Amino acid sequence: MTRALELAAAAAAAGEIPVGALVTDGAGTVLGEGRNLREATGDPTAHAEVVALRAAAAATGSWNLTGCTLTVTLEPCIMCAGAILQAHVSRVVFGAWDEKAGAVGSQYDLVRDRRLPVRAEVVAGVRSEQSIALLRAFFAAQR
């Protein structure tokens, strides 16, 4: 989570909503990193999670990230939860809950939905205070 928080801070410094993410394999080796890049790229899908998943898939040469963990500073949204399932990520670790748009336990629980053929383990609230502080500071500066 330390690295994800660093990526989130870098996103904020670049004018992006401060969310950072990384994908690690079963041994803890980082396969891909990402931070929000929507403003920089004009791409509505450039959420930190999607950026990290794309980097991990490129590094491994496969879309299938079974056995991998996605660590992210903010609970993933519906789009990102869908990407997590499509990539067969085994575990999602996140910091702050997203009570407005979260899809990994708050508003929805897409990655653990028993109706779907793929599910992921979820570990929530890891260093949530730091994630929340970054988000609050960013939005306070926007006002």
Image: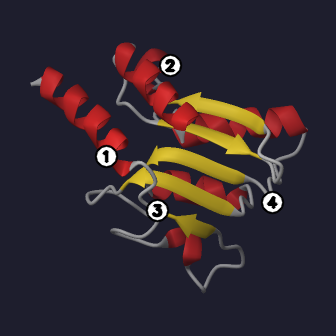
Lower position in the chain sequence, tag 2 or tag 3: 2
Label 1 crowd (10 A; few <14 / some 14-19 / many >=20): few
Residue 102, x across and y down, in percent: 38, 59
In space, the residues marked 2 and 3 are separated at their CA atoms by 29 Å
Disc 3 is placed on an element classified as: loop
In space, the residues marked 1 and 2 are separated at their CA atoms by 29 Å
In space, the residues marked 4 and 3 are separated at their CA atoms by 18 Å
- At 16% from the left edge and 21% from the top edge, which residue is drawn? 141
Disc 4 is placed on an element classified as: loop
Whether residues under marks 1 and 3 lie with C-beta atoms below 8 angstroms apart, the answer is no
Lower position in the chain sequence, tag 4 or tag 3: 4
The three-letter code of the residue at mark 4 reads Gly
The three-letter code of the residue at mark 3 reads Ala
Q: Which residue, as the protein is rendered here, is positioned at the far bottom?
A: 114
Whether residues under marks 1 and 2 lie with C-beta atoms below 8 angstroms apart, the answer is no
Front one among 110 and 123: 123
The numbered mark at residue 16 is none
The numbered mark at residue 124 is 3
Lower position in the chain sequence, tag 1 or tag 3: 3
Lower position in the chain sequence, tag 1 or tag 4: 4
The three-letter code of the residue at mark 2 reads Thr
Disc 2 is placed on an element classified as: helix
Residue to which mark 1 is pinned: 129
Which mark is nearer the camera, 4 or 3?
A: 3
Front one among 126 and 102: 126
Residue to which mark 2 is pinned: 41
- At 60% from the left edge and 85% from the top edge, which residue is drawn? 115
- At 60% from the left edge and 86% from the top edge, which residue is drawn? 114
Which mark is nearer the camera, 1 or 2?
A: 1
Residue to which mark 4 is pinned: 67
Which mark is nearer the camera, 1 or 4?
A: 1
Which mark is nearer the camera, 1 or 3?
A: 1
